Image (tube, rainbow, N blue to C red):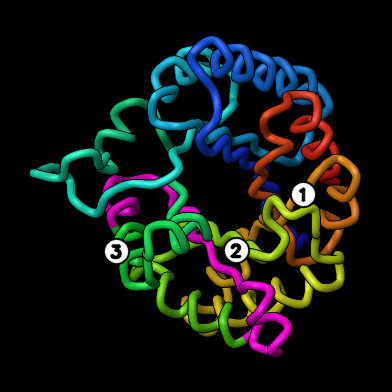
C-alpha cells in the first residue's frame, strides 16, 4: 500500500440477519476493533447491513469507531419510488458509506454503468462516500477481456467529482464471489494496477493515487494477509467472512 492510503475492511452482510443476529454481530465487531485500536492498527472497519438492520446496528456501533454503510441507494433525494431508499435517508440513519454497482445489483437488477454512476453521484451529493464496484465475469476473463471490462466499467461508473476522500473503488472478479474461487494475489494486483492507472488518468495523479481500491473476491482469513500485502490492494469488500466477527477481525489483522 502506498503511503497515505489507509486500509478499509468493509463487511457486506448482503441479505442476511434478523435484528437479534445483527445487533450481536455489530457488538462483536465493535469489540474486536476496541482490542485492535490499542495496537494502532492501520485500518478502518465498515459494516454494511441490510436496510432493516441499519438503525439497530447504528446504535450498537455508536462511538466505537466502526463505520456504517448501506448496500445500495436510489438516485433521488425523495419522491414516488416505492421500495427504494434515498441517500439522504441513509445518511439520516447514520451511514457514512454506500456501496453502488455491486455485481449482484448489476446482474440481478440489470444496473449498467450509467445507473451506477448516477447513484454514486447521489451518494457524493449527500456528503457520503461511494464504494463503486466493478469486475469481470469468468467468461470475460477467459476471453482475455478482463482488463478491457474493468476499464470500461470504471470509466462509465466513476462519479463526476470523485476524490480520494469521497470515493472508493472495489474490484470484484465476479467469478470469485461465493464460488470458492479466489484470484491469486498476482492476478488481483494486476487488475488493481490497471485500475490505479485509469484513476490517475481520470482524476489526476494525487487523487488517483489516493483513492482506495478494495479487493472483493472471497477474501478470508487464509488469504487476506497475502492479498493485502500487494501494493495496490487497499482493503477488502468482504462477504461471507463478514458474517463472523472472528473471521472479520482475522481479515483485518492482515493489514500491515
| Element carrying mark 2 | helix
Residue 156, position in %: x, y? 41, 77
In the rendered view, would you say 182 is above or below 225?
A: below
Mark 2 or mark 1, which has the lower sequence index?
2
Which residue is identified by label 1?
Answer: 219
User: What residue did someone put label 2 on?
Assistant: 210
- Residue at coordinates 38% horizontally, 70% vertically from top-left? 112
Task: Look at 43% across and 70% down and name the residue there.
Answer: 158
Task: Name the residue carrying label 3.
Answer: 118
Q: Residues within 10 Å of mark 3 (few under 14, many from 20)?
A: some
Q: Which residue is drawn at 29% across and 29% down?
A: 92
**Vertical comparison of 150 with 221: above or below:** below
Residue 87, quarter of picture: top left
Which span is picked out in magenta?
Answer: 122-147
Left or right: where does residue 16 sit relative to residue 107?
right
Q: Which of marks 3 and 2 is nearer the N terminus?
A: 3
Q: How far apart are marks 1 and 3 (CA)?
A: 28 Å
Give residue 181's position: percent from left, percent from top: 80, 59
Amino acid at each position: 500500500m502506498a503511503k497515505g492510503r489507509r486500509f478499509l475492511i468493509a463487511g457486506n452482510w448482503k441479505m442476511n440477519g434478523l435484528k437479534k443476529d445483527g445487533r450481536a454481530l455489530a457488538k462483536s465487531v465493535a469489540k474486536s476493533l476496541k482490542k485492535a485500536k490499542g495496537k494502532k492498527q492501520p485500518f478502518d472497519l465498515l459494516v454494511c447491513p441490510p436496510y432493516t438492520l441499519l438503525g439497530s446496528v447504528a446504535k450498537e456501533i455508536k462511538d466505537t469507531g466502526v463505520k456504517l454503510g448501506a448496500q445500495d441507494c436510489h438516485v433521488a433525494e425523495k419522491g414516488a419510488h416505492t421500495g427504494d431508499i434515498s441517500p439522504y435517508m441513509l445518511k439520516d440513519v447514520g451511514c457514512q458509506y454506500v456501496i453502488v454497482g455491486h455485481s449482484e445489483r448489476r446482474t440481478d437488477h440489470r444496473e449498467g454503468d450509467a445507473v451506477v454512476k448516477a447513484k454514486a453521484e447521489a451518494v457524493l451529493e449527500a456528503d457520503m462516500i461511494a464504494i463503486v464496484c466493478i469486475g469481470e465475469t469468468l467468461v470475460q476473463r477467459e476471453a482475455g477481456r478482463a482488463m478491457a471490462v474493468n476499464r470500461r466499467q470504471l470509466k462509465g461508473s466513476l462519479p463526476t467529482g470523485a476524490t480520494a476522500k469521497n470515493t472508493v473503488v472495489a474490484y470484484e472478479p465476479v467469478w470469485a464471489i461465493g464460488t470458492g474461487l479466489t484470484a491469486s494475489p498476482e492476478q488481483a494486483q494486476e487488475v488493481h494496477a490497471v485500475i490505479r492507472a485509469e484513476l490517475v488518468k481520470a482524476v489526476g495523479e494525487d487523487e488517483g493515487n489516493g483513492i482506495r481500491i478494495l479487493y472483493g473476491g472471497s477474501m478470508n482469513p487464509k488469504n487476506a494477509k497475502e492479498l493485502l500485502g500487494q501494493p495496490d490492494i487497499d482493503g477488502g469488500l468482504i462477504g461471507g467472512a463478514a458474517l463472523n466477527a472472528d473471521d472479520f477481525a482475522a481479515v483485518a489483522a492482515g493489514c500491515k
